Amino acid sequence: MNILVLHNKLPYPPKDGGAIAVLEFCMELVRQSHTVTLLCMNTKKHYFPVEYIPDEIKKAIRIVAVDVDADVKPFSLLINFLFSSKPYHLVRFNSQMFQNALKEELSKHIYHVVLFEGLFVMPYIRITKGIFTVYRAHNIESEIWHRMATNKKNLLQKWYLSSLAQRLEKFEKKAINTPDLVLTLTQRDECILKSMGCKKLIYVSKAGISISSSNHQRHLIQYPGIFFIGALDWLPNQEGLLWFLRSIWTKLHVQYPNLVFDIAGRNAPLWLQQKVKDYPNVSFHGEIDDAKDFIKRKAIMVVPLFSGSGIRIKILEGMSLGKAIVTTSIGAEGIPAIHNKHILIADSQEQFLSAIQMLLTEKHTFESIGQQAFEFVNQHYNIQTIVSDTLSFIKKAMSYQEKNHKN
């Protein structure tokens, strides 16, 4: 099939969950003999020159990147909040140039499927009439902001985030009934979309990971050690990281004065970089060139997440590399891993601290959880199987739709 994929950012370098999910899916489509064109926005925030993308990717996927200014502008945000009912997070990705590029693609090429990766490109579905459309919901976007609002103590912030969440939810409820097929990454998200009124066909297409035995190299691990990796411009990550530093790391440092906490992630705002320096034995790496190599060499991965939705691709990536991971119930949402076997789940300060202490003092437990995490992801999240099954379902849905049109 000839497939057009739309995304609101260039998924390279694959250093965050969304980029990994999009790029892995596209590359596997090509490996399974499909033709893929990726039409994406190259925003200022995540800008990357297309010419610097590795040739192996550019030869596999035809990439059309459109420069889009999607930066948050305080005045525009205020005007939107006061005089519009649309969510500002969605309005930012409204681009005439991207719309023109999409129209040009559809006029010059024949596509069997248009795949919308994420909610922020869904407004452009109005342009793709007559082509089979698939919306891949990476998460329940409004749920992220409802949770963020709940966690805020500042009343003004809580009020704004609640308003944003309500606006996103209103759009989301409309968007999920516009494509021909909806894909979710988890069964939990499937249930939520149905409760939101989705009448369309839904298929759970897990977030696949490329897995090979060479990824699982335990001899490279620098034990003991604790690390965090994630997009540091994402509010839930900022919220969770600051909680960990304040509530967990200060106590761990007293007990283990030589222990180092490594932090890596792109687009960390200056205020966050300064805040991290307030804590002892914290090594801030910022954006790193090779995320997989960084993860391979580290030991205990912490994902202190209290907001968010969907599935954490970084957790799956960490598990595929044999990491012992400590996260919250929200962090582990959508991943049917067993607590104390494949992963450690902790929702309070006491539980989080106790889980890390156990991994630091019981190396056999650390080794066992890392090994079983690798086996779990290899069994349930292999990208090759997931893409093959998803494409089979899409073809059946297309065939069913075609028969109905004929009748």
Image (tube, rainbow, N blue to C red):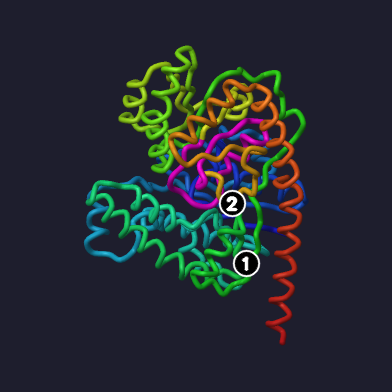
Query: In the rendered image, is residue 322 in sight?
Result: yes
- Quadrant for the C terminus, please: bottom right
Q: Give the x, y percent position of residue 167.
A: 35, 63
- Quadrant for the N terminus, please: bottom right
Of the two numbered discs 2 and 1 in the rendering, the one whose residue sits closer to the viewer: 2
Q: Give the x, y percent position of residue 225.
A: 55, 20
Reading the image, the residue beneath label 1 is 202
Q: Earlier in the sequence, mark 2 or mark 1?
A: 1
Magenta stretch bounds:
303-330
Query: In the rendered image, is residue 110 in sight?
Result: no
Q: Give the x, y percent position of residue 182.
A: 60, 64
Q: How crowded is mark 2: few (under 14 residues within 10 Å), some or many (20 or more)?
A: some
- Above or below residue 271? Residue 19 is below
Q: What residue type is labelled 2?
A: Gly
Reading the image, the residue beneath label 2 is 334
Q: Residue, x 57% and y 58% (percent of image)?
A: 188
Q: Residue, x 40% and y 67% (percent of image)?
A: 170
Query: Which is nearer the eye, 214 or 251?
Result: 251
Which quadrant holds residue 82? Answer: bottom left
- Above or below residue 140? Residue 58 is above
Q: Which amino acid does label 1 sit on?
A: Ile
Judging from the image, what secondary structure is the residue with disc 1 in? strand
Query: Which is nearer the eye, 87 or 33?
Result: 87
Residue 317 shown in magenta: yes
In the image, taking residue 311 as reference, residue 342 lies left or right, namely right
In the image, taking residue 163 as reference, residue 10 lies left or right, namely right
